[in-house]
Image (tube, helix red, strand yellow):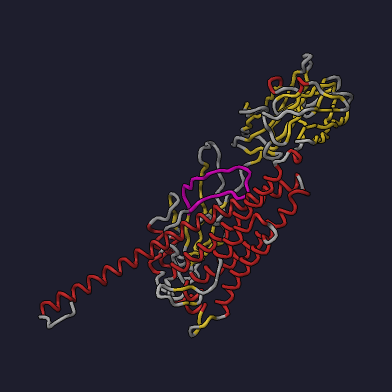
Amino acid sequence: MAGGKLSPRQKMINLMYLIFIAMLALNMSKEVLSAFGLMNAKLEKSNDAATQRNSDFMVGLADKVEEQRAKYQPLKEQADKISVLADEFNAYIIDLKGKMTAEVDDKTDYEVMDKGDFLDEYFFVGGELKSEGQEFKDKIAEFRDGVVGILADNPQMQDISKDVLAKFSTGEEETRDGIKKEWLDYHYKGFPLIASLTKMTQLQADVKTTQSEVLSSMLAGKLKIEASLTNFEAIVVPEKTAFFSGENFKGKIILGKKDNTLSADKVIINGRELSAESMQAGQTLLEFPAGAVGERNIVGEFQFKEGDSIIKIPVKSSYAVVSKPNSAVIAADKMNVVYRGLANPMTVSIPGIPDNRVSASGTGLRKGSGTGKYIMTPGGGKEVKINATGTMTDGSKVSSSQTFRIKDIPKPMATVRKESGYVKMPKSSLVKTTVGVGLPDFLFDLKFNVNSFKVKAPGSATIVVNGSRMNSQAQAAINKARSGDVIAIFDVKSSIQGVSGISVKDASAVSVEIQ
């Protein structure tokens, strides 16, 4: 299009082609920005799930330490160090991302995040790194070197160490033209804000993935060691937790790792070798006189042949022998009160008497699903009495009763964006938000329907809104508000989903400061 002498008509055609190409490039740019934004949102959701998985792992590991401190405490100490490194680095990135988007009103409007000015000015000055840029690289190095240092003495973790070194490398990068560039300049200088934001989120994902891989590999190595017969544990499982005087003790002993093909060569309990019939696939059955009232010990050992050696697994446990019961045990599963109009789960049982021989009665009480399970739905009054009766095997009766207080459902709290009390948000968001109702820290997980509420904006009359979303009058009043004005949402009336006949108190007000 640029060669030779062109006619005015051909020049006009060429100009139109240039304009058309520019328009295509503009549209493509918006699509790319949106694609980065959607990818960032997906990564953040995935990061939340990874955070929960890692948290669950640490909780499970803490339980393991409680059970077997000597075996799992060293593993937990390493896991704690990894978690501290990951949490500190993740917190730094969260703070940095907050600074990057501080001037962006709508965090989901990705097409406005097309400039790279923030990081260009935050990390660089005159083509050189600022202290903030060096700090970013130092934080990466601190996490990378910290993890590698923790894993240095574990030969089974060296592949992960190499992966961490590669994944969190901050060395020079080479462009397609073969030019070497400083790492931070190569990855973040001149990029649109949304692209850099997505890279930060990916960096968080790499941190969480590394943490997950390290923790999983640590536990896998420990479990491999635990698979040997030398690490089995014998567990006594009584048929019930306590026995009456004169009864026979009944129960079984199983090994920590259940294997239907496994059978001991010899089992000695309380000085007596058990018969071959007592030893079945993966377990050993026990039956002997329970003894007098009090705590009784079970001691002995399992013997296995492993190669030329005899592996002995000690057995040590105890059980209690109790007198016949003379009273029932009644407990509210939630707490020592029941809530009016709600289905309160309760447990009614009598020690030593099976559930099919126990009956319970009370106003609003009905049988639930499961052993000893009942549902109490109290109505009027301040107290309700539960009576329980059990029938012994000899036909005698055992009866008892207990009184529970009846309380009303507490006053709920009005919410916007699931936040209560005093909230800050743009008025563009407030006009579109849904007003909700919640009961934080309440024992029951209740869902509410908002029926109506009132809105008061400075300079406007109080507006009554039906439903849970702002009507046109409320939206108009909010749109008149200025930054710093406080919008009050009060007299929120609601009802509980799936529950009828309960009068819910008006929810406490929520105040929204316009940003």
- Pick whichever, 119 or 402, lies toward us: 119
474 up-or-down from 273: above or below: below
- Residue 107 placement, left or right of 353: left
Q: Residue furthest front?
A: 308
- Pick whichever, 38 or 500, lies toward us: 38
Residue drawn at 69 percent across, 39 percent down:
337
21 up-or-down from 250: above or below: below
The answer to whether one can see residue 477 in this image is no
- Residue 493 placement, left or right of 143: left
User: Residue 402 in the image: x percent, y percent?
Assistant: 74, 31
User: Residue 235 in the image: x percent, y percent?
Assistant: 76, 34
**On the image, which quarter does residue 502 sit in?**
top right
Q: What residue range appears in magenta?
A: 435-453
Q: Which quadrant, please, contains the N terminus?
A: bottom left
Residue drawn at 43 percent across, 75 percent down:
178
Query: Is 186 in the magenta?
Result: no
User: Residue 392 in the image: x percent, y percent?
Assistant: 77, 18
Q: Residue furthest bottom?
A: 126
Residue drawn at 76 percent across, 22 percent down:
278
- Residue 300 placement, left or right of 262: right
**On the image, which quarter does residue 223 sit in?**
top right
395 up-or-down from 286: above or below: above
User: Residue 464 in the image: x percent, y percent?
Assistant: 44, 54
The answer to whether one can see residue 38 in this image is yes
How many badges with numbers are in the image? 0
